[in-house]
Image: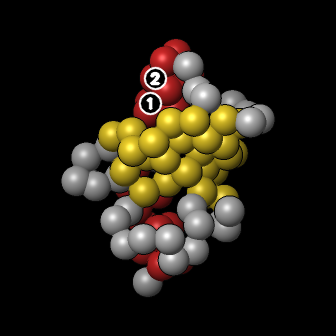
Amino acid sequence: MSPTFLDKQGYKFGIFSNEEKRMHVHIYKQDCEVKIWLEPTVEIAQNYGFSKKELREIITIVKENEEDFKTKYRAHIG
């Protein structure tokens, strides 16, 4: 994954270069991963192993950092 946008509460937030055009962020912690769409609204695209409690925490962090993630996504993808 490159680059990492944020490392918070053990979660790493980032993207894969040139994966797809729709804005999103991948979140990792240990052996779990979730992909979150940033547009048109913040929502879960795919979840691999996170509990509902963890997903609520992740969504909260994504919403708190949504504009920053979008800015970094645009800067990296172009």
Residue drawn at (69%, 31%) of the image: 9
Q: Is residue 22 above or below residue 50?
A: below
Question: Quick check: can you spot residue 8?
Answer: no
Left or right, 20 with respect to 4, comes to left
**Do callouts 1 and 2 mark residues in contact (Cβ within 8 Å)?**
yes
Q: Which residue appears at 61% of the width and 41% of the height?
A: 33
Which residue is more in the foreground, 72 or 21? 21
- Look at the picture and state if 2 lies above or below 49: below
Q: Is residue 41 left or right of residue 74?
A: left
Q: Residue at x 57, y 62 (%)?
A: 15
Q: Residue 60 — which label?
A: 1
- Residue type at mark 1 is Thr
Q: Residue at x 68, y 62 (%)?
A: 1
Q: Which residue is mark 2?
A: 56
Q: Position of residue 44 (x, y in %)?
A: 39, 39
Mark 1–mark 2 Cα distance, whole angstroms, equals 6 Å
Residue 60 spot, x, y in % from top left: 44, 30
* Residue, far left: 40
The kind of residue on which mark 2 rests is Arg
* Residue 55 in the image, given as x and y percentages of width and height: 49, 26
As drawn, which residue projects farthest toward the bottom?
78
The figure's colour scheme reads secondary structure
Q: Provide the secondary structure element on which disc 1 rests.
A: helix
